[in-house]
Amino acid sequence: MWCVNSCSNHNLTTSNIFSLCVCFSFCNITLVCAGSNTGIGKATALDLAKRGARVILACRSRERAEAAVYDIRRESGNNQVLFMPLDLSSLQSVRDFVETFLKTEPRLDFLINNAGIVGPGRTQEGFGMEFGVNHLGHFLLTLLLLERLKQSAPSRVVTVSSLVHLLGHIDFKLLESTKDLVQGDRNTLKNLQAYAHSKLCNVLFTRELANQLEGTNVSCFCLHPGVVQTELGRNMSLIHQLLVLPIAKLFFLDPEGGAQTTLHCVLKEGLEPLSGRYFSHCAVAQVSAKGRDDALAKKLWEVSERLTGI
């Protein structure tokens, strides 16, 4: 499916520590990248557009996504970069996106679940924003696109998680009663706790998804992108952003550096036996004990099916 090409004319390295050891020219490849109008997602989409892929930017903001499409087309020279509206805070929007995609796109080789949010608020269905967007929205999107991924196999699902999943846990009783992963009024600490819990959900989802996909020639991976300076915290308080921004500029990776492990999981040949695993720094990494709990992963899957009405 993938055609090996020389890296001599395409610089994959950044000023950061990550670089890919492989380079592919994509022949008739279609991919969806959620949350790709800025940050890691945009950097990922640009790299894959440069390789010749047909890239669908699945984003909430039409204005920002269309600007990203223009930028990526101009820089990559690839006109097969398109925008389709997707608001992961609305399960109906996810269904509408999938309906449009399946009507217009005959194949899907890669699904990149990249969108993420940290901050207060509720989704349209009343779920806490981090749980609803970072997990439930991607969960529903993936399941509704699974048949097309199977038809296009070998194919991959790549989900951006985070190292902070190590701090996460899932209280199903709390989720049942409040539709959220944290309790009480939100503050900065609770927002970050909810984010960590949602990132654990990403790890567990990938683990169970690999079990569900066994024998299908569809593989899945999740990853920690590094500590990246993006717009992830744009919904957090102004004081918190002012505190974090100077540190981010000094120590965080730029989006191109942060995209490298995502690209590794998309591009690297021979990863299929590692389906369900978690990557960091372009290599398999250890997850928390909770992230290795198959019973917990299965329960989250079953609860997520019920909550999304799948």
Image: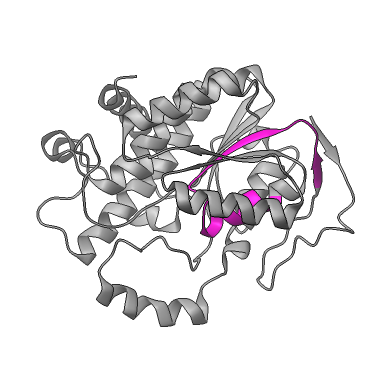
Q: Nearer the viewer, residue 256 or 80?
A: 80
Question: Which residues make up the magenta segment?
Answer: 24-47
Tell me where residue 101 appears, x and y as whole percent: 53, 26
Tell me where residue 57 appears, x and y as whole percent: 55, 42
**Above or below for 142 versus 199:** above
Residue located 33% across and 47% down the image: 198
Locate the C terminus and report the quarter of the image it occupies. top left
Residue located 40% across and 60% down the image: 232
Colouring mode (rainbow / by chain / secondary structure / one colour): one colour
Tell me where residue 285 appears, x and y as whole percent: 55, 52
Q: Is residue 267 magenta?
A: no
Tell me where residue 230 appears, x and y as whole percent: 47, 64
Residue located 41% across and 26% down the image: 96
Q: Is residue 37 magenta?
A: yes
**Above or below for 151 versus 113:** above
Q: Is residue 48 left or right of residue 249?
A: right
